[in-house]
Image (cartoon, rainbow, N blue to C red):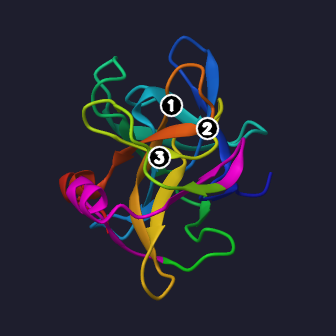
Amino acid sequence: AAPATVSTGDKIAIRHADGQNNTCTLGFVLTGTDNQDRGLIAGHCGDLHDEVMTLDGRTIGRIAAVEFPDTFNGPDTAVVSFLPGVTVDAAIEGVHPTVSALTKDEVKRNGPVLCKLGSTTGLSCGPLADISAPATMIAFHAANEDGDSGSPVWAYGANGEILAVGTLSGGPHGNNNIAYVEPIADYLKLWQLR
């Protein structure tokens, strides 16, 4: 079989140690200090060392680090290391490349419209939501359904550039029009990604 190709916003499958699979969305793809690509997903999508696959069953990598305390009131992000030979497209279709990441404080202070690209619900944008969100996250108005977890979430800069905000975690129970985003600026430093 030809080597797998995967893009930001693609639906991916995560195979757990017990053989069960679930689907999520591949978030931002960044570069490590070793010049290798890494992808971000939601932490609840899988556990450390779980296999990450295309929907047709080709392994593209493994989860290399997870921040998820088994509760949706804490961090919810993870990083995927891709296998050699896997082609990774970091661009978000139809929009400019990512230039930097906004911190949670910057998002709260500036109140930008946030956009997300989910493999289930596609592209959707909206303002910040004035509701309580899990401790580390920000709530905003956007479509959100099963399979969208891990979606890249961003704001647009003054010149149309993408300012990364984070990975989509989910939303309030029973409300598919509000999404929670886990900001990634601190994790990019922790995991040395750019």
Q: Which numbered disc flags the more N-terminal residue, 3 or 2?
A: 3
Towards the viewer: 150 or 16: 150
Q: Which residue is at 36% across, 34% downward?
A: 76
Give yes or no for residue 65 being in the magenta stretch: no
Is residue 86 found left or right of 48 in the rendered image?
right
Residue 171 is labelled as 1
Residue at (65%, 33%) from the top-left corner? 145
Q: In which quarter of the image is residue 96?
A: bottom right
Residue most toward the top?
A: 18
Placement of 166 over or under 147, stated as above or below: below
Q: What separation in Å lies between label 2 and label 1 (alpha carbons)?
A: 8 Å
Please tell me the numbered disc located at residue 140: 3
- Residue 68 % position (x, y): 32, 28
In depth, the one of 107 and 4 nearer the eye is 107
Instruction: Give the amino acid at mark 3.
Output: Phe
* Left or right of 104 on screen, residue 13: right
Residue kind at label 1, given as amino acid type: Gly
What residue span does the magenta drawing correspond to?
98-123
Pick the quarter of the image with the C terminus. Answer: bottom left
Give, as a three-letter code, the residue at label 2. Asn
Front tag of 1 and 3:
3
Sequence-earlier tag: 2 or 1: 1
Secondary structure, mark 3, is: strand
CA–CA distance in space, label 1 to label 3: 9 Å
Q: In this view, does 162 lie above or below 73?
A: below
Reading the image, the residue beneath label 2 is 177
Contact check, label 2 and label 1, Cβ < 8 Å: yes
Identified at 43% across, 51% down, the residue is: 128
